[in-house]
Image (tube, rainbow, N blue to C red):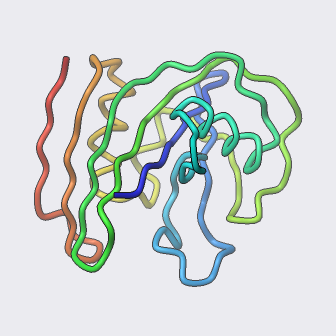
């Protein structure tokens, strides 16, 4: 199973989002996602998300809040466990990302972006400030075929 992270950086009623449009054969091509990525050997979720955010955005995260865990499965792909964080405390200068375009998006417009269907589910939970969640998402290609949500 792949372990990875996402971090929704929040500032002035906006989230920093990444339009994946620069990498070849990118499973996320054309989709908007949060900065984040896969664990390196021996990393904790917090170490991973801080490193990934710094690499992709140039920003240094000062405080993290773990909001949920995603279990992702899709035929032909390895299962993935994704730790979802938010942060409104960070510093540094935004840099260009080699994976796509970074853009601050009003939280009120987030759900109108080209997102994975399952991302809409947990983003709505983040926007509604719902409790910690565990969400299982199963896909066939781009189509969400199963979802299971638990909150704590």
Residue 100 at x, y percent in the picture = 68, 64
Residue 111 at x, y percent in the picture = 39, 45
For the point 54% across and 53% down, the residue is: 38
Above or below 132: residue 81: below
For the point 68% across and 41% down, the residue is: 53
For the point 58% across and 39% down, the residue is: 43
Residue 124 occupies which quadrant of the picture?
top left
Residue 21 occupies which quadrant of the picture?
bottom right
Is residue 128 or residue 68 the one in the foreground? 68
For the point 48% across and 68% down, the residue is: 28
Residue 12 at x, y percent in the picture = 66, 21
Above or below 110: residue 9: above
Q: Is residue 30 left or right of residue 144?
A: right
Instruction: Count every numbered label the image shows and give the total.
Output: 0
**Quadrant including the N terminus:** bottom left
Is residue 120 or residue 141 the one in the foreground? 141
**Quadrant including the C terminus:** top left
Residue 59 at x, y percent in the picture = 78, 34
Is residue 27 or residue 38 the one in the foreground? 38
Residue furthest to the bottom in view is 25
Q: Is residue 138 left or right of residue 54?
A: left
Residue 140 occupies which quadrant of the picture?
bottom left
Q: Is residue 72 left or right of residue 61?
A: left
Q: Is residue 82 left or right of residue 117?
A: right
Above or below 87: residue 84: below
């Amino acid at each position: 199973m792949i372990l990875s992270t996402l971090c929704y950086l929040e500032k002035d009623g906006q989230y920093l989002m990444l339009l994946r449009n620069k990498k070849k054969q990118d499973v996320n091509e054309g989709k908007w996602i949060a900065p984040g990525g896969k664990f390196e050997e021996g990393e904790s979720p917090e170490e991973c998300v801080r490193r990934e955010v710094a690499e992709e955005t140039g920003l240094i995260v000062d405080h993290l809040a773990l909001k949920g865990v995603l279990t992702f499965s899709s035929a032909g792909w390895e299962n993935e466990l994704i730790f979802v964080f938010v942060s409104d405390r960070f510093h540094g200068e935004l840099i260009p990302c080699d994976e796509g375009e970074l853009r601050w998006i009003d939280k009120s417009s987030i759900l109108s972006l080209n997102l994975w269907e399952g991302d809409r589910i947990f983003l709505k939970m983040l926007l509604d400030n719902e409790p910690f969640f565990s969400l299982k998402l199963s896909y066939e290609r781009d189509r969400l075929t199963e979802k299971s949500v638990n909150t704590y």
